[in-house]
Amino acid sequence: MDLVSANELIKTLGVTDGTIRRYVEKGALPPPIRVGVKRYWTKSDLTEFFESRREKLLG
């Protein structure tokens, strides 16, 4: 299982940590896996999530 840390996601998306938190709260990102205070997402969860969002936007 490949994991993406919050820091990697922040760099990839070019947003702040606060923005990542808001995206999760609003459902714009799937909920993270928490290990202590650190947050991670699986690459497969992110891929599935963004593909479904793209399909919804493009119809």
Image: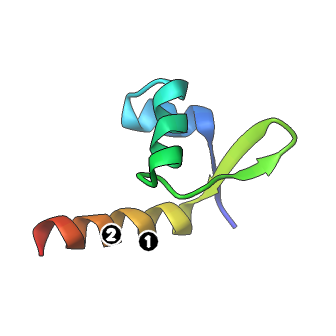
Classify 16 as above or below 45: above
Disc 2: CA contacts within 10 A as few (<14), some (14-19) or many (>=20)? few
Distance of label 2 from label 1 (alpha carbons): 5 Å
Q: The residue under label 1 is which amino acid type?
A: Glu
Q: How many marks?
A: 2
Viewport quadrant of the C terminus: bottom left
Q: Residue furthest left?
A: 58
Residue 37 x, y percent position in the rendering: 81, 35
- In the picture of the structure, the residue carrying the numbered disc 1 is 48
Q: Residue furthest right?
A: 36
Q: Secondary structure at mark 2?
A: helix
Q: Quadrant of residue 52?
A: bottom left
Q: The residue under label 2 is which amino acid type?
A: Glu
Classify 10 as above or below 59: above
Residue at 54% across, 67% down: 45
- In the picture of the structure, the residue carrying the numbered disc 2 is 51
Image position of 20 (left or right of 2): left
Q: Quadrant of residue 5?
A: top right
Residue 30 x, y percent position in the rendering: 53, 58
Q: Quadrant of residue 55?
A: bottom left
Residue 40 x, y percent position in the rendering: 67, 48
Residue at 42% across, 37% down: 12
Disc 1: CA contacts within 10 A as few (<14), some (14-19) or many (>=20)? few
Classify 1 as above or below 36: below
Which mark, by number, is residue 12?
Answer: none
Viewport quadrant of the N terminus: bottom right
Residue at 36% across, 62% down: 50
Residue 38 x, y percent position in the rendering: 76, 38
Choose between 49 and 24: the one closer to the eye: 24
Q: Are marks 2 and 1 in contact (CB under 8 Å)?
A: yes
